[in-house]
Every structure is written in C-alpha cells, then in structure tokens.
C-alpha cells in the first residue's frame, strides 16, 4: 500500500511524543536543563555533519540570504508564534493559562522537531521509494529513529513536538503522491542542497537551545526550498 511508510512515521512520532510527555512530567527542572544542553550539543553535531557535506557553499549562502529575506517579508516566525499562542493555550499543562514562555516553547518544539524529522535524505528517498515502488522500508527505519527522538524532544519541549507529525505527514505525503513527477527533479545534487541548507538550520536550532542568542529560524525556512530550486536549475 502506497503511503504506508508515511502513516507509520506519523504514528511513531505521535506515540513517541505521548511517551515523552508522560516521562517529562517527572523530570525536575535542573535535570531538564542539563538534558536540554546535552540534546543541544547533539543537534549541533547533526547540523554540522549535514552542512559540511555541501557541494557548493555559494548555493547555501544565496539560499539562506534569499530565503531569510522572503521569510521575513512573509513574517513566518510571527505566524508560527500566533499558532503557538493558540495551540499553547489549548494544550498548556494542567490547563493553566498559557504564558509567553509556554507559547515560545510550543513553537520551538514544533519547528525544531519538524525540521529534524523532515530534512534529510531518508525523508526524501524513502518517500520516493514508497511512491514509486511501494517499498516503505526506508521510512520504517526512519520511524524508529523519529519515534526515539520524539520521546526525548517532547519530554523537554512539550506537546509542540507531537504537532510535527502533521509536518511530516504533509511533506512526505506530497513527495510520495507526486513521486513519479518530482522524482526526476530530485537529483543527488538537489537532495544534497536540501540536506545541506537544512543542516545549517538544524545547527541554528542547536544554538537556540543553549539560550545564548535567539535566531529567527522560522523566517529562514524558505531557504530550504530556494536551495532546491537553485540546485535544480544548476
């Protein structure tokens, strides 16, 4: 059945998020803080590994500049914050009134998890293989990885991580359904450009997790699509 891999991936993220939320309730703040720092270091390493595989640094630079300007113009970060304000109020723990910190945490969890789960070769190649050959093997392997990550992230970021399943479902679902059309355009160079720029954004997520500086990652998201377009043209 075509699309089974993406459905399994979505279910895995939701299951992992629910488990993480349950485990997170018993974690004291001091332990949560040190775990967050440890995760931040791992996220930085993951981002660096992906970013350093770039085949053309100029594509990354142009994509980030153009994509960031476009994202700033569209005010993507503000829209995500509005979404966080709405959903954060609905799903705040203990049904308390959502504070600004709760809203920011929701958005950070949603954006961070969405990027980490969607960016990378496994999401792209797995979706194409599922759509073209009906073989969800790669996405099954990705499901195990994402479910494990969802446990850790949701324990620290909260319910926003669970909503990243929506991003994964839409992103991988579109790739799977349109695999016969988009497949020829997603060459090794295009996939490499998407992964490289995505790695830089994942690196930015790791930096944000340390709380030293607040990068507006939401407004940088169009850079991934700009990178794909530039790589396809070149």
Image (cartoon, rainbow, N blue to C red):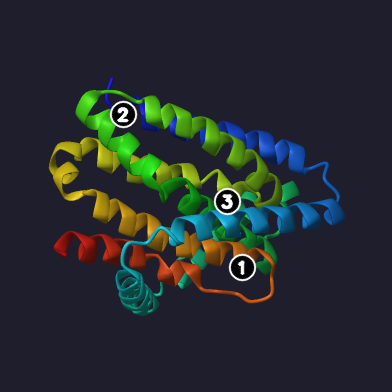
The part of the image, by quadrant, that contains residue 122 is top left
Tag 3's secondary structure? helix
Identify whether 72 is placed above or below 197.
Answer: below
Q: Which mark is residue 160?
A: 3
Counting labels gives 3
* Residue at figure coordinates x 42%, y 70% from the top left: 220
Q: Nearer the viewer, mark 3 or mark 1?
A: 1
Q: Quadrant of the C terminus?
A: bottom left
Q: From the image, tell me which residue sits under label 1.
A: 207
Q: Front-most of 175 and 204?
A: 204
Label 1 neighbourhood size at 10 Å, few (<14), some (14-19), many (20+)? Answer: some
Q: Nearer the viewer, mark 1 or mark 2?
A: 1
Q: Earlier in the sequence, mark 3 or mark 1?
A: 3
> Which mark is drawn over residue 148?
none
Q: Is residue 74 visible?
A: yes
Residue at 20% in and 30% down: 132
Residue 98 in the image: state x and y as whole percent: 67, 60
Picture coordinates of residue 97, whole percent (x, y): 70, 59
Labelled pair 2, 3 in contact (Cβ < 8 Å): no
Q: Secondary structure at mark 2?
A: loop
Horizontal side of 34 relative to 208 (left or right) equals right
Which mark sits nearer the N-terminus, 1 or 2? 2
- Tell me the CA gap for discs 1 and 2: 34 Å
Mark 2: give few (<14), some (14-19) or many (20+) Cα within 10 Å.
many
In the rendered image, residue 179, in percent from the top left (x then y), is placed at 20, 38
Residue 99 visible in rendering: no
Distance from the alpha carbon under mark 3 to that under mark 1: 19 Å
From what the image shows, is residue 91 above or below residue 127? below
Identify the residue under disc 2.
3
Of labels 2 and 3, earlier in sequence is: 2
């Amino acid at each position: 059945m075509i699309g089974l891999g993406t459905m399994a991936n979505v279910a895995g993220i939701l299951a992992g998020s629910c488990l993480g939320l349950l485990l997170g309730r018993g974690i004291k703040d001091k332990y949560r803080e040190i775990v967050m720092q440890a995760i931040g270091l791992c996220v930085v390493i993951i981002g660096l590994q992906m970013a350093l595989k770039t085949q053309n640094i100029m594509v990354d630079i142009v994509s980030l500049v153009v994509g960031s300007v476009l994202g700033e113009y569209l005010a993507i970060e503000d829209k995500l914050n509005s979404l966080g304000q709405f959903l954060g109020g609905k799903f705040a723990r203990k049904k308390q009134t959502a504070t600004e910190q709760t809203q920011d945490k929701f958005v950070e969890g949603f954006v961070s998890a969405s990027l980490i789960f969607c960016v990378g070769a496994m999401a792209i190649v797995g979706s194409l293989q599922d759509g073209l050959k009906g073989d969800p093997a790669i996405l099954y392997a990705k499901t195990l990885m994402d479910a494990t990550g969802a446990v850790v992230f949701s324990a620290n970021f909260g319910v926003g991580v669970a909503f990243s399943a929506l991003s994964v479902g839409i992103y991988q679902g579109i790739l799977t359904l349109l695999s016969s059309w988009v497949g020829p355009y997603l060459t090794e160079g295009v996939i490499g450009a998407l992964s490289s720029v995505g790695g830089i954004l994942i690196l930015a997520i790791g930096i944000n997790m340390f709380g030293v500086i607040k990068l507006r990652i939401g407004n940088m998201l169009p850079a991934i699509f700009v990178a794909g377009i530039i790589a396809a043209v070149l």
